[in-house]
Image: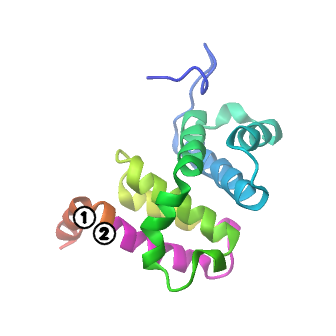
Amino acid sequence: MSDPTTAAAGTPHPTGKMARRRARELALQGVYQWLLSGNSMTSVQRHIEAETEDLDKVDRELFVSLLRGVLENADDLRAAFSPLIHRPVAELSPIEHAILLLGAHELRHNLETPYRVVINEAIELAKGYGGTDGHKFVNGVLDRLAANLRAVEVEAARKARG
């Protein structure tokens, strides 16, 4: 099911691994921009799209879904991960905050994406854009969050590993 706001008629819809990774990167940029500027979702989305070269190589549907999902549900997403961190959310770096929001959203709403993929993608974002050990923090928080949000999937994966 395609939303007319996310794909132009006749435009190929890239869905490969790199197209999804790039969608997550753009969503991260948008969430980061939103956290710092407080601009509207529409304004942030338009800015990211206008500044992005090769937008046709991005899974735009995933980008829009992630950006809108995080911005519309940020308070609920923070409530899901804030008990799992040992400092107030306000003390997180904006990039870690944005990555945790994205990861929490995907864990909660993108059930077709395996939880390990969500966590691994968040780790890669943290390695690429975050501080030196930010990826370790993101990994720990999202791993505990996955156990809360996707208990059956996490337990099945643990049993399969032995």
Task: Tell me the kind of residue under disc 2.
Answer: Ala
Q: Quadrant of residue 63?
A: top right
- Which residue extends farthest top? 10
Confirm whether residue 121 shows in the render: no
Rendered residue at 61%/82% (across/down): 133
Compare residues 31 and 7 and report the one nearer the observer.
Answer: 31
The location of residue 67, given as percent across then percent down, is 60, 46
Task: Tell me the kind of residue under disc 1.
Answer: Ala
- Which residue extends farthest bottom? 86
Residue carrying label 2 = 147
**Numbered circle sitting on residue 151:** 1
Quarter that holds the N terminus: top left
CB-based contact (under 8 Å), mark 1 and mark 2: yes
The location of residue 9, given as percent across then percent down, is 61, 14
Disc 2 element: helix
Confirm whether residue 114 shows in the render: yes
Q: Quadrant of residue 42?
A: top right
Residue 52 versus residue 127 in the image, above or below: above
Judged left or right of residue 127, residue 106 is left
Q: Does the magenta portion include 146?
A: yes
Question: Mark 1, residues whose alpha carbon is within 10 Å: few (<14), some, or many (≥20)?
Answer: few
Residue 115 versus residue 161 in the image, above or below: above
Compare residues 47 and 14 and report the one nearer the observer.
Answer: 47
Rendered residue at 37%/74% (across/down): 144
Q: Does the magenta portion include 75?
A: no
The Cα–Cα distance between marks 1 and 2, rounded to whole angstroms, is: 5 Å
The location of residue 38, given as percent across then percent down, is 74, 54
Quarter that holds the C terminus: bottom left
- Which residue extends farthest right? 51
Rendered residue at 71%/54% (across/down): 34
The magenta stretch spans which residues? Answer: 128-147
